[in-house]
């Protein structure tokens, strides 16, 4: 991987058309099979929050989903299934690149707090010379957030090779491409990483998301409000 970057060094990157992709794969077994991205946080569907964040910084939108009703979830947004079904999150990233036929910014559809400014930094970093992918650092087990990341077209072939080998780890191909890390300090400028990258996988997570949304808008001592986007 390329050393952690501050996005300021990437601002001079050439203009590249980027598709924003909402990844709605998975059977939501921990959510009783319910389409969890259609749940609401503070009155708005999670999928709408993700779409708005991506729409603000991308040139086009794509929904990758296998549910037969998925085409009705975001009217006007192109919807496509996995090209290689049943291969988990890595299969979803593969589908994003295959259908977009170019670079993508992907966000899992169960992440209600990802912000447009964070995605803009990932886009700027990912489109810099010598970079194939950009991913934010975090305190997760992997140390990065591969389901909120930029992937260039050069990632498609390495992903296909790893899948053909039976390696379905979502970061299986990272050693085969040039990955730039959005460092922890750069990520923290956008808010608490635990909030930014929170996934709603269970009803308890949904309740926690509601609580975190409320906390973000509690009045501060100067009468202002949290500047994180919700």
Image (cartoon, rainbow, N blue to C red):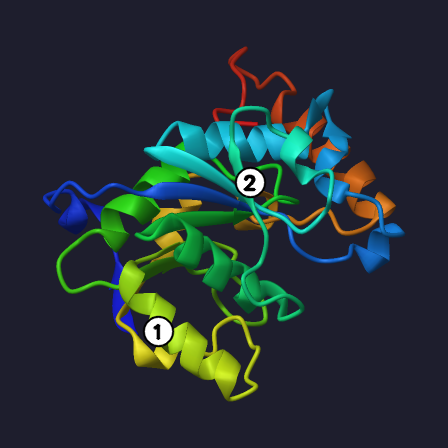
The image shows residue 58 at horizontal and vertical percentages of 35, 35
In which quarter of the view is residue 136 placed? bottom left
Distance, label 1 to label 2, CA atoms, is 22 Å
Residue at image x 38%, y 49%? 100
* Residue under the point 58% across and 58% down: 82
Which residue ends up furthest to the top in the rendered image? Answer: 223
Q: Earlier in the sequence, mark 1 or mark 2?
A: 2
In depth, the one of 184 and 100 nearer the eye is 100
**Residue at image location 78% in from the left, 46% down from the top:** 205
Residue 227 x %, y %: 48, 24
Between 72 and 92, the one lying in front of the other is 72
Quadrant housing the C terminus: top right
Q: Is residue 6 visible?
A: no
Q: Residues within 10 Å of mark 2 (few under 14, many from 20)?
A: many
- The N terminus lies in quadrant: bottom left
Position of residue 107 relative to residue 90, above or below, is above
106 horizontally vs 87: left or right: left
Horizontal and vertical percent position of residue 55: 42, 29
* Callout 2: SS: strand
116 shown above or below 64: above
Crowdedness of circle 1 by 10 Å Cα count: few (<14), some, many (20+)?
A: some
Q: Which mark is residue 157?
A: 1
Horizontal and vertical percent position of residue 60:
38, 34
What label does residue 79 carry, if any? 2
Q: Is residue 124 left or right of residue 74?
A: left
Q: Determine which quarter of the picture holds residue 36.
A: top right
Instruction: Please say whether residue 166 is visible from this viewpoint.
Output: yes
Would residue 24 appear left or right of 119 to someone viewing this image? right
The label shown at residue 70 is: none
Q: Residue at x 54, y 18 (%)?
A: 225
């Amino acid at each position: 991987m390329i050393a952690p970057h501050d996005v300021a060094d990437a601002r001079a990157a050439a203009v590249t058309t980027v598709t924003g992709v909402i990844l709605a794969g998975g059977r939501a077994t921990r959510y009783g099979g319910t389409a969890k991205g259609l749940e609401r946080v503070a009155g708005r569907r999670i999928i709408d929050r993700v779409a708005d964040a991506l729409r603000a910084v991308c040139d086009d939108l794509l929904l990758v989903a296998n549910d037969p009703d998925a085409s009705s979830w975001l009217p006007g947004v192109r919807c496509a299934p996995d090209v290689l079904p049943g291969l988990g999150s890595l299969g979803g990233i593969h589908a994003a690149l295959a259908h977009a036929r170019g670079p993508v910014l992907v966000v899992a559809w169960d992440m209600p707090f990802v912000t447009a400014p964070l995605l803009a930094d990932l886009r700027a970093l990912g489109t810099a010379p010598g970079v194939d992918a950009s991913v934010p650092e975090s305190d997760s087990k992997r140390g990065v957030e591969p389901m909120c990341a930029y992937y260039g077209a050069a990632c498609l072939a390495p992903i296909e090779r790893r899948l053909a080998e039976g390696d379905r780890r979502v970061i299986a191909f990272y050693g085969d491409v040039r990955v730039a890390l959005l460092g922890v300090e750069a990520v923290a400028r956008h808010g608490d990483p635990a909030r930014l990258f929170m996934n709603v996988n269970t009803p308890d997570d949904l309740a926690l998301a509601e609580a975190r949304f409320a906390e973000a808008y509690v009045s501060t001592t100067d009468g202002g409000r949290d500047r994180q986007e919700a």
